[in-house]
C-alpha cells in the first residue's frame, strides 16, 4: 500500500474541514458528515468481515447522525448526544449479528471490529463541536492549530526512515507547527505551549497510524479510503477536548 496516496487523501480531508470552518459551522458538519460516511462504508472492507453492506450502513448513519447532533446540540453541551448515537450504532451492530443466525464465520471479529468502527465514526462529530467553540470573531483557532500539527506529521510520515526516527520527528514537527499556528493567531489568545500540545497530540495519532499502514496491505479501494480518513475523523473529538481546555 503506497503511503503517499493515504497521506494525500488524509491531507485533502483535513484541508476540507479547515476550509469549511472559515465558511460556517454547517459547512463543517456537511464535510465531516461526508467523511464519516466514507469511513463507515469502507470500514467493513478494511476489516474484511461479512455483512459489509449492512454494517457499513450502520457505521455511516451513526457518523452522519453524530455530526448532525453536534450541529444542533445546546452550546453548553456540544457532544451531549454522542453517547446515545454511539449506543444506537452498537445496538444495531449486535442486531445484525443476531439476524445473521448461528454458526456464521468471523462473528466475533465482525462484532468487535465494527463496534470500534461505530465509536470511530461518531468521534468525527468533534470537529463540528470544536468549530462551534470559535471565538466571537469567527476564528476557529482550535481547529486550525490542531490541523497544522496533523499536516506537519503527515508530511514527516512520508520520509522513508524507520519508525524510531520518524515517530519522534513527526511529533516534534507537529508540536512546532501547532505552536507556530498559535503565534500567527494572536487574537485567539492561545499560549504557545498549549498550541504545541494540541499540535503534538494530533501528530502522535498520525505517526501511530503510519505504522499500521506500513504493516499490512489493503486490497480494496474502499478499505484504503477508510484507513486514510479514519485518523482524521477520529481526531475530531480529541481536537474538541483539547480546544475546550486550552483555547480561551
Image (cartoon, helix red, strand yellow):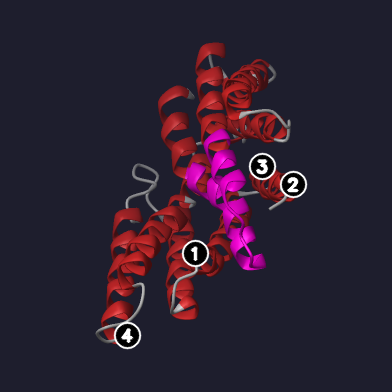
* Disc nearest the viewer among 4 and 3: 4
Whether residue 221 is in magenta: the answer is yes
Q: Position of residue 239 (x, y in %)?
A: 49, 36
The residue tagged 2 is 8
The residue tagged 4 is 100
Whether residue 231 is in magenta: the answer is yes
What crowding class fits label 2: few (fewer than 14 Cα within 10 Å), some (14-19), or many (20 or more)? some
Left or right relative to 1: residue 216? left
Residue that appears at 51% across and 48% down: 128
Q: Position of residue 150 (x, y in %)?
A: 62, 34
Distance from the alpha carbon under mark 4 to that under mark 2: 38 Å
* Disc nearest the viewer among 4 and 1: 4
Q: Earlier in the sequence, mark 4 or mark 1?
A: 1
Q: Secondary structure at mark 1?
A: helix
Distance from the alpha carbon under mark 4 to that under mark 3: 41 Å
* Disc nearest the viewer among 2 and 3: 2
Q: Earlier in the sequence, mark 2 or mark 1?
A: 2
The residue tagged 1 is 64
Distance from the alpha carbon under mark 3 to that under mark 1: 18 Å
Left or right relative to 23: residue 91? left
Residue that appears at 48% across and 64% down: 47
Q: Position of residue 52 (x, y in %)?
A: 48, 76
Q: The magenta stretch spans which residues?
A: 207-236
What crowding class fits label 3: few (fewer than 14 Cα within 10 Å), some (14-19), or many (20 or more)? many
C-beta proximity under 8 Å, tags 4 and 3: no
Q: Earlier in the sequence, mark 4 or mark 2?
A: 2
Distance from the alpha carbon under mark 4 to that under mark 1: 25 Å
What crowding class fits label 4: few (fewer than 14 Cα within 10 Å), some (14-19), or many (20 or more)? some
Amino acid at each position: 500500500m503506497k503511503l503517499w496516496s493515504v497521506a494525500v487523501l488524509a491531507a485533502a480531508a483535513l484541508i476540507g474541514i479547515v476550509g469549511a470552518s472559515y465558511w460556517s459551522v454547517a459547512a463543517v458538519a456537511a464535510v465531516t458528515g461526508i467523511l464519516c460516511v466514507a469511513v463507515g462504508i469502507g470500514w467493513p472492507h478494511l476489516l474484511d468481515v461479512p455483512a459489509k453492506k449492512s454494517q457499513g450502513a450502520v457505521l455511516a448513519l451513526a457518523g452522519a447522525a453524530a455530526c448532525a447532533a453536534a450541529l444542533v446540540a445546546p452550546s453548553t453541551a456540544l457532544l451531549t448526544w454522542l453517547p446515545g448515537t454511539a449506543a444506537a450504532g452498537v445496538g444495531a451492530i449486535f442486531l445484525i449479528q443476531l439476524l445473521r443466525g448461528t454458526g456464521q464465520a468471523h462473528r466475533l471479529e465482525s462484532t468487535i471490529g465494527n463496534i470500534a468502527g461505530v465509536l470511530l465514526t461518531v468521534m468525527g462529530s468533534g470537529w463540528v463541536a470544536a468549530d462551534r467553540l470559535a471565538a466571537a470573531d469567527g476564528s476557529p483557532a482550535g481547529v486550525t492549530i490542531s490541523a497544522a500539527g496533523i499536516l506537519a506529521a503527515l508530511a514527516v510520515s512520508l520520509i522513508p526512515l524507520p519508525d524510531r526516527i520518524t515517530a519522534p520527528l513527526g511529533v516534534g514537527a507537529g508540536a512546532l507547527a501547532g505552536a507556530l499556528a498559535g503565534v500567527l493567531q494572536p487574537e485567539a489568545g492561545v499560549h504557545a505551549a498549549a498550541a504545541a500540545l494540541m499540535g503534538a497530540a494530533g501528530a502522535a495519532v498520525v505517526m501511530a497510524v503510519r505504522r499500521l499502514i506500513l504493516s499490512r496491505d489493503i486490497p480494496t479501494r474502499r478499505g484504503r479510503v477508510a484507513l486514510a480518513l479514519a485518523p482524521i475523523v477520529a481526531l475530531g473529538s480529541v481536537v474538541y477536548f483539547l480546544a475546550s481546555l486550552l483555547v480561551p
